[in-house]
Amino acid sequence: MHKLTIHKLGPVEQCELECVPFLTLTGFQASGKSTIAKAIYFFRTIKEDFIELAQRQVFHLIPIGGLDDDYDLGYGLSLEKGLQRFLREKFFRVFGPMYGVSSEMRMQYYFTKACSVAVSCTQDYEQANCRAEKIKVTFSDALKRFLREKNQSFSATPAGIPDQEKKLLESELQQMFDDRCGVVYIPAGRSMLTLLSQQFSYIYATMHDAQKESLDLCTRDYLERILRLRPEFQEGLLGLQQYTTVRGERLAADITQQALDLISLILRGTYQYKSGEEQIRLKSGNYVKINFSSSGQQECVWILNLLFYYLLQKKPMLFIIEEPESHLFPESQKLITELIALVNHCGNEILLTTHSPYVLGTLNNLLYAHTLKPCFCKKAAGVIPESFWLDDAKFDAWFVQEGAIENCMDEEIQMIQNERIDEISKVINNDFDRLLELQNAGVEGGGKECR
């Protein structure tokens, strides 16, 4: 089981949690949910960093793409040292400048008992001349040995690196890190990016590297993924099925239809990228350009697209989704939560941050359906399809507040605690009770205060 620990990073003072296949973070804004999500992204994408560096090592492509022009790994640098340097720079690209960061900052991710990566501040980080010298990256002994064994592991041919070598290294990395998943990060604040849909390709293409570097890596990853995948939606979601086949297999027809039905209900139409513009096709046959669609459609459209695209690919993914409920009506919040649960049911992992009691309430229903006795299962499936159910053994929820995290699962019934589902309702109800007491006191006193 993967485990993450954080000490004094951003708003997070202390955090220790196991990264189960469906992980939910809730709590007040600016409490540290995104920091935890970004930390998991940082560590879970190290496999891809490793492969990128191994490919560049064999062709001596220096500097590494995405880093500052003057940041040079150095010819002949070992894979171990190169990855350490890369991750030091990656830390700033994910979390931003080090202003106000404690010298005691440390985070560590345990992929297995033997394989872990730690990131901390150097002892003299305040006096360091460059930002890369402020951060220390430490690999476990088993990972160090693996890195040394795989140094110069690719062979160069006129046609490039043989696919067989790439697949072998990917397989060995999956085993070393106990991780078969790719990572898709879907950040909050998506509607503005969608609003600039038609202009963004031009804007992004004309930005120089320094301007692109001003975007945090998670947002940049999301934007570049959309720009890369948009052309594949020329025939809409239905068109994806015509050529999306992996190992001669297709996604089960009932699962595909369930996903399409949920997407149609949430989006109130279907997405299509046609003639260089993003469109929402309505049931009437008309369409609206995405930048003129509702804020709810703009917020959720690429959550839906990415979930469906990778669902069809049948390749395990970790989806890190921030606030899927943004700008959505409560019924649509329920539906998008069910779609996310369906994707999880098909072998994908989920990390969800949310403020919504509707999202948390829906998750509880899906957890409860799974706990029903076998004799009730068929009837329960008539209420909530079994492919939406969540296994409590693979689910966890945490409340993030004042720099710490608190598990908010009820141990007895294995559901999210009711008081956490709508934390603010206690305050609202308390205010109402006090107002009611004032009114009752006035009635009992003959209303003298009002005279």
Image (spheres, rainbow, N blue to C red):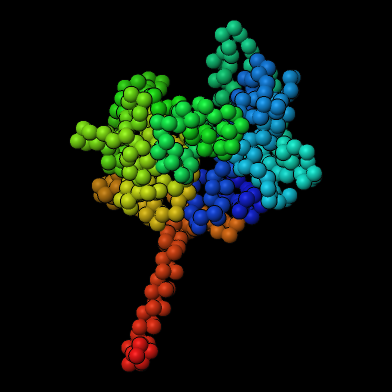
Residue toward you, 153 or 412: 153
Looking at the image, can residue 9 be seen?
Answer: yes
Tell me which residue sits at (66%, 45%) in the image: 107
Give coordinates of residue 217: x percent, y percent: 57, 36
Q: How many marks?
A: 0
Task: Report which quarter residue 386 is drawn in.
Answer: top left
Tell me which residue sits at (32%, 92%) in the image: 446
Decide if residue 43 is on the left or right side of residue 332.
Answer: right
Residue toward you, 384 or 308: 308
Taking the view exactly as shown, the residue that stands out farthest to the left is: 284
* Above or below, 76 relative to 192: above
Give coordinates of residue 428: x percent, y percent: 41, 69
Q: Quadrant of the N terminus?
A: top right
Give coordinates of residue 111: x percent, y percent: 60, 38
Give coordinates of residue 148: x percent, y percent: 72, 25
Tell me which residue sits at (68%, 41%) in the image: 118
Tell me which residue sits at (50%, 51%) in the image: 25
Taking the view exactly as shown, the residue that stands out farthest to the top is: 158
